[in-house]
Image (cartoon, grey):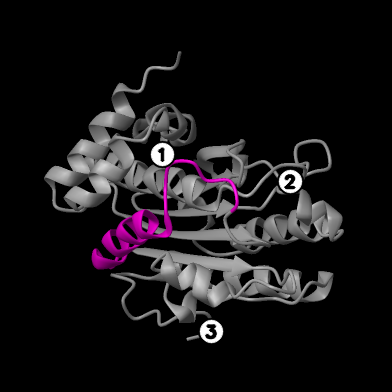
Amino acid sequence: MPDTTTSTQLIRQARDAGDLSATSYDTIMLAPDIGTQIQAGLGVVPDDVAASEVTLVTLMPDDSGSIAAARNEASVRLGHNEVLASLDGSKQADGVLVHTRYLNGTVLNPCRPLAEAERMTEQNYSASHGTPLYDQAVVVLGTVIAKAKELEAAGIPTRTITLLVSDGEDLHSRQQTAASVRALVEDLRRTEMHVVAAMGIDDGRTDFRAVFGAMGIPDAWILTPANSAREIRAAFRLFSQSAVRVSQSAAGLAGLGGFGA
């Protein structure tokens, strides 16, 4: 079993520093096996980060069966990969870390330099699972919090931007609720060094603004593309533009009002 000491210590440090509320701390620490899941995403150690400051870009692509049923696997793969390509073309590319964890927990990219980040392919991505949206959002955001704290403790200023992607409402969470995700999102936003965004791919019935709004994500940071390849890829491009803006920010992120703002 992987050693979870590092992830547990980092979450405790975030609480002690006032970055995590007691509610968020309990949400993370009381969930079974979450330390192991966070540990799997921490990736590169601070001593191996060459940049003097870092932007951590996290993507949680949906790998539920409905993505395949709607024939959107290729669009999700291309969208993710275009985000990385856009960042790779920016002046701040050397300071970008990438973290990719699918909706059902598979870690494609533990936090690693952009130059080393794997692209999504037919071989490493199969949309054939469920929709544990709340459970996995807590794992993803817990990893973001832990990694940011680890880098900051090493003297590396860190900004983060995270995109949660789903084409349906939560159906398979067993531990978390929208309220527990909200507590984490609000803690992250309060520091003004983190952006949490979401993309809801239209399934013809889900009100994604209500779903993600209940999770604490501001309306201005919610994308709702139609169920088409063109709109899905356009939504990923909007996110990539925001990720580049975050990487270029010299201070806090409070001034970023949302996509395109």
The answer to whether the residue labelled 1 contacts the one labelled 3, judged by CB atoms less than 8 Å apart, is no
Circle 2 crowding by C-alpha within 10 Å: few under 14, some 14–19, many from 20: many
Q: Which residue shows up at 71% across the image and 49% down it? A: 64
Label annotation for residue 49: 1
User: Total number of numbered labels?
Assistant: 3
| Front position in the image: 217 or 155 | 217
Q: Is residue 215 left or right of residue 12?
A: right
The answer to whether the residue labelled 1 contacts the one labelled 2, judged by CB atoms less than 8 Å apart, is no
Is residue 241 visible from the viewing direction of this image?
A: no
C-alpha separation, residue under disc 2 versus residue under disc 3: 26 Å
Determine the image quadrant of residue 187: bottom left
Question: Residue at label 2?
Answer: 120
Callout 2: SS: loop
Is residue 238 visible from the viewing direction of this image?
A: yes
Amino acid type assigned to the residue bearing label 3 in the image? Gly
Q: Which residue shows up at 41% across the image and 33% down it? A: 34
Q: Which residue shows up at 44% across the image and 64% down it? A: 196
Q: In which quarter of the image is the N terminus?
A: top left
C-alpha separation, residue under disc 1 versus residue under disc 2: 23 Å
Q: In this view, does 141 lie to the left or right of 107?
A: left
Amino acid type assigned to the residue bearing label 1 in the image? Val
Question: Residue at label 3?
Answer: 260
Q: Which residue lies furthest to the bottom in this view?
A: 261
Determine the image quadrant of residue 79: bottom right
